[in-house]
Image (spheres, rainbow, N blue to C red):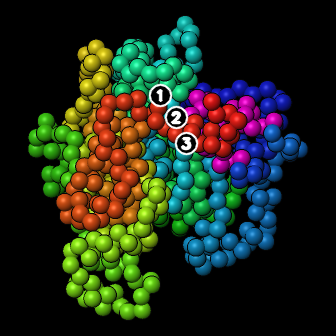
Amino acid sequence: MDYPVDSFTPDEQARLAPHVTNLDRPVFALTNLPETVKGAMFARYSRYQGTLRRMFLDEFADSLPPVSAPSHHADDTEGTRAAELYERIFVGYGDDSVAQLGGAHVACEWVSNVLTKVLQRPRLGAYLEQSTRYIAYDVPMDGAGTRAPRYRYYRDPALGPVYEQSMDEVFGIYSGLLPRVRAWVDESFPGDPGPARDRAIGAKALDLVRGLLPAASLSHMGIYATGQTYEQLILHLLAHPLPEARECGTQILDAVQAVMPSFVSRVPRPDRGGEWIGYLQERDAAAARWVTRLGLDRPANETTGRPSVRLLHVDGDEDALLAALLFEASGVSEEDARIRLSALSTDERTALLGDLVGNRRNRRHRPGRGYEALRYRFEIVSDYGAFRDLQRHRMLTVQWQKLTPDLGAGVPEDVDLAGCGGEYRRALELSRVAHQRILDDGHDPRVAMYALCLGYRIRYVMDLNAREAMQLIELRSGREGHPSYRAVAHEMHRQIAAVHPAVAATMTHVDNDNEPRLERILAEMRTQSKLDQLLPERAG
């Protein structure tokens, strides 16, 4: 696929060259920059319309001293002695832990929303992705011109002309609805005028129409991870059925090789990485064979899909939780502790749990590792947009099925109230037909996912311990969040309360207020309040 390429003046190229591993490819690593600068750039990424290299020049370059020449060549980065050490210990002895001792910042630009989920799958990594809440997709990549608009979505000639025609029409509907929905939001949620309200109105409008964006929509992502995480990610990308994923895997390998080659030295070796990739492909093929053999590839009734949250399995009880919380402070076995705890009344157990959890003055105050003694396994059906937000949580197991139209799609009530429901539904149907056309042409179902709008539903499993459940539910129930994932968080909390009421009661920062609102205005107000406290001269 051809992507927009940044155009740099010779002076800009000279400023950039020491700090990126290449100037003209969509995947590159950052070099010769302070950790704070790299972190700040990735933090800015989610709300910046352009590319990371352009952002560096526009917002960061002038604050840094010039670097005379690039120094991200392998010999300069690692040194001969360090490279030999890794060759002996990492490759020769297979001591994987040494690959955790170095990390790199890598930017992956112009990647589809299908691929972003693959890129974010490793647990031990940090990711920052452009947000559909702050980035509008109504402006073509090439701007206005005489040629047809080139909206921001993944293209592949192999997908055929119908795919591009359908995607262009879907993006055209999205672009037409966005100002109409924004005007309705502005009229329906009165408030004091100002920049914060304007941003909140824009965010809500983008939230309401984001379900029309196809999974092919392109995003930029920043990744910070260790060498070990990059090795695993690259192997999974190279084994993936999507050509886009394999190409991205190759480019991430090139970028990491440019800054810390020893950490990924096993990947290109046929007897190491080659064998690994073959194993992953064989495992994927075996699952596909058995799904077909058992008739698990399609639901019996394609019209039964509705948003749902089901608690499939609970592992552990509140006595196990209490024993685990007391374990590190005690001098007896966990079994002995459970025996003594069994003598307590229900009220005493509840009081003990409250005492051990403590006074949580904000949602970042979380109990200790003992809370990991309980596990919950949920099966969830939600729109793909909500799944994208929930999948980002690291310390849990997320497994998801392919995105298909089988579970249907919803239309936000506010979109209907804005008088835009008909066009919204037409875009969903265009998306469904394009998906079916790709399947009819013999493509892998995972390739056909590109055509489906984010409003279509997907089934996935979230397996998490009570500590992570507290973090996820309190964060995602926040009133500034998107209504679709707030609904999932609320239902998870309700179902945990049904089996472990004392545990649910410690989740004191769950926000159950569902009053219609401008969601982001609350975050804007809290941010401004904190700024006023830090900078009192600006208050008032």
Look at the numbered discs 3 and 1 and tell me whether their residues touch, using CB distance below 8 Å: no
Query: Which of the two discs, 3 and 1, labels the residue nearer the N terminus?
Result: 1
Q: Residue at x 44, y 71 (%)?
A: 368
Q: Nearer the viewer, mark 3 or mark 1?
A: 1
Q: Amino acid at mark 1?
A: Ala
Image quarter of residue 109: top right
Query: Which of the two discs, 2 and 1, labels the residue nearer the N terminus?
Result: 1
Q: Amino acid at mark 2?
A: Glu
Give the camera-side residue of 6 and 471.
471
Relative to 352, is 400 above or below? above
Q: Secondary structure at mark 3?
A: strand
State how many labels appear: 3
Would residue 388 be seen by someone viewing this image from the given angle? no
Please state if 113 lies on the left or on the right of 29 as rendered: left
Q: Secondary structure at mark 2?
A: helix
Q: Residue at x 32, y 87 (%)?
A: 337
Disc 2: which residue = 524
Look at the numbered discs 3 and 2 and tell me whether their residues touch, using CB distance below 8 Å: no
Look at the numbered discs 2 and 1 and tell me whether their residues touch, using CB distance below 8 Å: yes
Q: Amino acid at mark 3?
A: Met
Label placed on residue 221: 3
State whether the magenta stretch is mostly helix, strand or loop. helix
The answer for how far apart the CA atoms under marks 3 and 1 are is 23 Å
| In magenta stretch: residue 48 | yes
Label placed on residue 200: 1
Which region of the structure is painted magenta? 37-62
| In magenta stretch: residue 104 | no
Q: Residue at x 73, y 68 (%)?
A: 83
Task: Give the crowd class for mark 2: few <14, some 14-19, many >=20 residues within 10 Å.
Answer: some
The answer for how far apart the CA atoms under marks 2 and 1 are is 8 Å
Label placed on residue 431: none
